[in-house]
Image (tube, grey):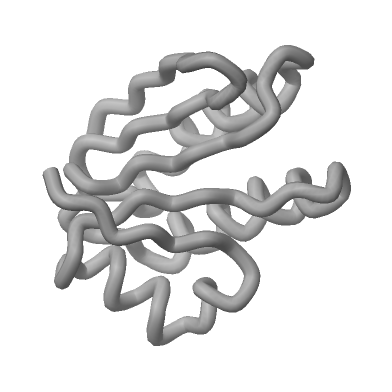
Amino acid sequence: MVVTTARTGDEAIVSVDGDLDLTSVGAFHTAVDSLLASQDRKRLIVDVRDTDYIDSAGLEQLLVANRKLAAQGERLRVHVLPGSQPQTVLTITGFTAVMDVEPISS
């Protein structure tokens, strides 16, 4: 898995290429925490369009990030590939009720 970060205007973006699972959540967590600590971002987007699989450890880290944003009055935005496993698992688990899961074509 490769985690990259970028900034565009007032948005901070964490992109995940590969599986977001128990073996890779550490790098993801570090990247998200770094961006959340930044004072110049207003939104955090997690882009998992290039992610084939998210397990419970990955889901937990998305919830952790969302809780931190909720404390600031914000919601996590997650970009998913329509019909992908990440979109399906986020929908089935009810994450769409607490964060913005946005289907975006690649």
**Horizontal side of residue 69 vs 34, given as left or right:** right
Which of 85 and 26 lies nearest the eye of the viewer? Answer: 85
Which of 65 and 20 lies nearest the eye of the viewer? Answer: 65
**Horizontal side of residue 82 vs 91, given as left or right:** left
Spot occupied by residue 7 in the image (x, y as percentages of width and height)? 48, 15
Q: In which quarter of the image is the C terminus?
A: top left
Image quarter of residue 29: top right
Which residue appears at 21% of the width and 36% of the height?
17
Depicted 3 relative to depicted 9: above or below: below
Spot occupied by residue 36 in the image (x, y as percentages of width and height)? 69, 28
Which residue appears at 29% of the width and 64% of the height?
86
Which residue appears at 74% of the width and 48% of the height?
74
Number of marks in picture: 0
Which of 21 and 97 lies nearest the eye of the viewer? Answer: 97
Which residue appears at 61% of the width and 20% of the height?
10
Spot occupied by residue 84 in the image (x, y as percentages of width and height)? 17, 66
Image quarter of residue 1: top left
Image quarter of residue 6: top left
